Amino acid sequence: MSKLMRPSFDAELIERHGGEGPRYTSYPTAVQFSDRFRAGDLYSAIAESNRLPIPPDLSLYVHVPFCSSPCFYCGCNRVITRSKTAGDEFLATLKKEIDLLGPRFDSDRLVRQLHLGGGTPTFLSVDQIEHLLNLLKAHFVFADDAEIGLEVDPRTVAPIGIKRLHEIGFNRISIGVQDLDPDVQKAVNRIHDTATVGATIGAARAVGFDSISVDLIYGLPLQTTAGFAATVETMVQLQPDRVSLFNYAHLPHLFKGQQRIKTEQLPTPATKLAIFRNALNRLLDSGYEFIGMDHFALPGDSMVKARTDGSLVRNFQGYSTHGGLDLVSFGPSAISQIGDSFAQNQRLLKDWTAAINEGHAATARGLTRTTDDRLRAEVIERIMCTGQLVYRDMERFFQLRFRSYFAEELARLEPLADDGLIEWTGEGFRVTPAGMMFLRAIAKAFDAYIKPQGQQQGRFSRIV
Ligand code: SF4
């Protein structure tokens, strides 16, 4: 029996409201970051956070930038290499970065969450990953029940490696599958067979990972409705706790690697929608709950609980069950969020390395939120995570009259209400089943940085 709202699918609404929009892993989004924000600003933000009466606990992120071969659809910041020494050189610089930032945080601020992303964290051997964990533990105290997770490329870790990752402390795993159709895999240069994926998930379940999550992508070249339905069917049989169903954003002007994808091999918009509709319905019919945007989870998963009790949040990894933490990030392009400040590291490995070797944080850009930013961030997060907004909650926190402060934004929502994506409740509004697919479009109405139609074309991915 479904606890959460089941989204409905309507091709006409997708045509009208499924255009481009930010994913709101932060507000303001990274597009607004300024290169005037530097290492000194990050240090000040950390010092200020330590001075709070109760400083928030911490979430750590490490960006491991390496991959041994390029997936053509990739939009991540990564370095393609087969170098045997790259991992050790990276860890040597990472140690310096952790030594630089770690002591700045009060030692009683517990780590509640750690995530390794990339790139491919499992480009590193399990021994190297264990070394990385120990570098962090030299400066940070981990809570006993900390969520410790990483992204795994099934091509890079044998089941025995999965077992060892669990032994050294990992309890969450996210496996990049994308599509199991051999033709699609060839077209995107990412080849792994179904048996390998099954063995990875099976090994993770056998050793007791608390949460196993799988990423799929629809809209890839040569995808067909039948082919992707078979991939989804395999996933339904393998029963990962969470499934992310990402919409491939073909933005070759932004991501050079995507130029290797043959445009004529991309599914037509109609096929892509059919692929998505079938996948959505199959996941929901087989018992997965819809969390929001592209995330699904089994009823027993902590993400469903967080979505139900209102504790779900957005952060740079997407939806998360842990709110109220400061995020401390390491590695090239990684973004920290300390209080109201965002700080992004140098994107390029060589620039990140050079900055750390000069003895300071590798901050290249960032910003400190204004009160208006904070207010809009809260509004957007509530829409994205709870699907509703009660004005007086915002009025209480921010001392304002919501209807007059947001008169323009509420007027922008009228066409969405007319199309049945939201319904006014008297004390605010709530997203309807038809609107669940369009959380980003609804949230976008409150984004003060969105320029008039057209000016930001090609900057963000499509909402559906
Ligand atoms: S999709 Fe992942 S594994 Fe593939 S190139 Fe990008 S970061 Fe590397």
Image (spheres, grey):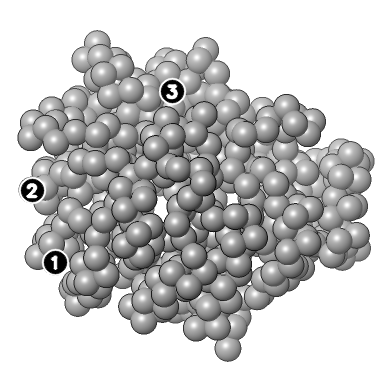
Amino acid identity at mark 1: Pro
Q: Position of residue 411 (x, y in %)?
A: 91, 45
Residue 124 position within the rendered picture, expressed as x and y whole percent measured from the top left: 15, 44
Distance from disc 2 to disc 3, alpha carbons, whole Å, reads 31 Å
Q: Nearer the viewer, residue 363 or 203?
A: 203
Depth order, front residue of 381/287:
287
Residue 356: mark in rendering: none
Mark closer to the chain start, 3 or 1: 3
Is residue 275 depicted above or below 222 in this figure? below
SS at mark 1?
helix
Q: Quadrant of the N terminus?
A: bottom right
Tag 2 near tag 3, CB within 8 Å: no
For marks 2 and 3 on the same chain, the one whose residue lies earlier in the sequence: 3
Residue in the picture at 25% in, 14% down: 354
Dot 3 crowding, Cα within 10 Å, few <14, some 14–19, many 20+? many
Percent from the top left, x then y, of residue 342?
50, 30
Task: Return the residue at label 2.
Answer: 127
Q: Which residue is mark 3?
A: 42
Residue at (70% x, 72% y) in the render: 8
Give the residue type that dot 2 points to: Asp
Quadrant in which the C terminus is drawn: bottom right
Quarter where residue 210 is shown: bottom left
Nearer the observer, 412 or 279? 279
Drawn side of residue 24 relative to residue 39, left or right: right
Residue 430, relative to residue 300: is it above or below?
A: above
Q: Earlier in the sequence, mark 2 or mark 1?
A: 2
